[in-house]
Structures are given as structure tokens and as C-alpha cells.
Image (spheres, rainbow, N blue to C red):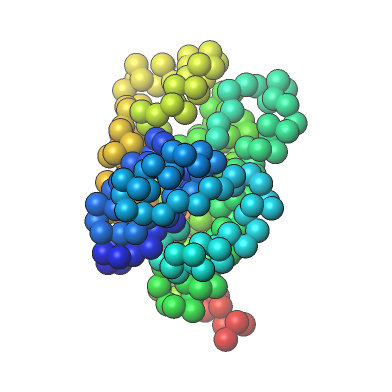
Amino acid sequence: MDLNDACVLITGASRGIGASLARAFAGQGAHVILAARSADEIESLATELNGSSIPLDVANPEQLSGFIDRVESQVAPVDILINNAGIETQEFIEDIEEDRIEEVLATNLLAPMRLTRQVLPGMVKRGRGHLLYTSSIAAITPAPGLAAYCASKAGLTRFAETIRMETTGTGIHVTTMHLGPVDTEMWTRVTNNPAFDQAQQRLRRLRMLADVSPDKVAADAVQAVLKQKRDVRHPKRLWPTMALAAAPGRIAEFLVRGVNHRIHKT
């Protein structure tokens, strides 16, 4: 997809990976629409990038209802939707409050599903579009202290894989980013959990984990959209593990290749 003048909607865009994504896509000539709870931060960044900002709490179903319609009526049709907003857990499951579990699932899984549901009809009608999901290596490997987070990201990964199958032949492309340690405030909070910190320290000693900057993630995301790549994976040294985890989905796609999944809609 040509990114010049493309309309890119990014959730969780106020800081970290989201802010880096905004700068990277704006640097390619895209018009970025920044969505996050921090209204002042996304407004300031949007001004810097000559983009737009629309405050949004993705965990709030009322704010999500009709959000894509509002974006497209105020700005332009969405060419690229980046479901980046996410929150983590830091406790064993028996120590997490019920409302926190609901917030994690609403933010990490339900919001991307709802926004995808809203944006797809327009993309299908126009015959083009790109969906990008910020998932995690926690989607494919267990992590102590992150049970709810792992579950939400595993669901997101499978959701993205299924959407890829459902949109075959429509001109829509899907990219999933499976990320390990990224130098952000979220990673700092996660490693404050002693159970998880011990596990990740051991993996570092085994040279299986390595940090990556949010700017590197964003640069790879841009290339994934330009080249219609299905995956962005960090750290690279865990590529074999990630490839094995992706194998069942790839096999399923191969077995039903050529099937028109949308024939009932025509």
C-alpha cells in the first residue's frame, strides 16, 4: 500500500510503541489519527505530526460504539487500522481484582475485535486496507504473573489469523506483531513482578531475550504494511519458537486455500 496520504488510525498512540508508530507512518507521508485516553498527549503529538487526535478509552464500549463512523466522518476513510492499545497484569491470577481482568480483556482483545468489525465493511467495499495488531510473545508462550495478559494476547493472535482467512481476496492485508521486551514503561512495570522477572532474567542468561526499541518496532511495522508482510517478530532470536507456534494456522490456511470464504455474502 502506498502510504502517502493514507489514513492511519492508531490506538494507544499517546506514548511508547503507539507514539513511535505515529511518527514512523507520518514520516512516510501518511495522515495519522491518534486515539488514546490521554487527550492532551495525543493532541500535542498530532499537532507535531500534522495529524488528527480523537480521545478514546478502548475499554469503554460506549466510546467504542460507532467510533470508526465518527473518525471517517470527521477525517477520512481509514486505510490502515493499528490495534495497538494494550495493558498488562503483574499479579498471579488469584490476586487480580475481577474488574482488572475485565479491563485487560476489554482493552487487549474486545476492543480490537470491535474496531475491526466496524472498519471492515468500508475496507471491503473499497477493496483495500490493512489491519495491524500489536500482540506479544506472551500469546505463544506462558509467563508467570501474566495469565490474564497471555490469554488476551493469545486470543488476539488467533483472531488476527482468522480475519486474514476471512478477508482473503478482498484486497485487505493483516499483520500481527509478536513482541518481547520493548523499551517502554509497560515492560518496566511487567518486570516489577518478581515471578516474571526471575523467568525473564533466566531467559536473558540463555540469550533468548533481547531488548528492542519502539522506534525499531515502528520501522518494521511500516515495512510490513508496505510489503504486505503477515508478521513482525521480536526478538529475532526467538524466531524458531514463533514460527512453530504459527505453524498450525499456516497449515489450516494451506488446507483451505482456494475456498471462497465469503461466497455467501455475494
Residue 111, how many percent across, how many down? 60, 50
Quick check: 236 above or below 202? below
- Residue 147 visible to the viewer: yes
Q: 263 left or right of 199?
A: right
Q: Quadrant of the N terminus?
A: bottom left
Q: Quadrant of the C terminus?
A: bottom right
Quick check: 29 above or below 111? below
Residue 5, how many percent across, how many down? 30, 65
Q: Residue at x 30, y 33 (%)?
A: 213
- Front residue of 9/256: it is 9
Q: 24 left or right of 184?
A: left
Q: Residue at x 54, y 73 (%)?
A: 121
Residue 185, how many percent across, how many down? 43, 26
- Front residue of 154/172: it is 172
Residue 235 image-quadrant placement: top left
Count of numbered marks: 0
- Front residue of 71/40: it is 40
Residue 149, how many percent across, how many down? 58, 34
Q: Residue at x 50, y 57 (%)?
A: 161
Quick check: 2 above or below 32? below
- Residue 228 visible to the viewer: no
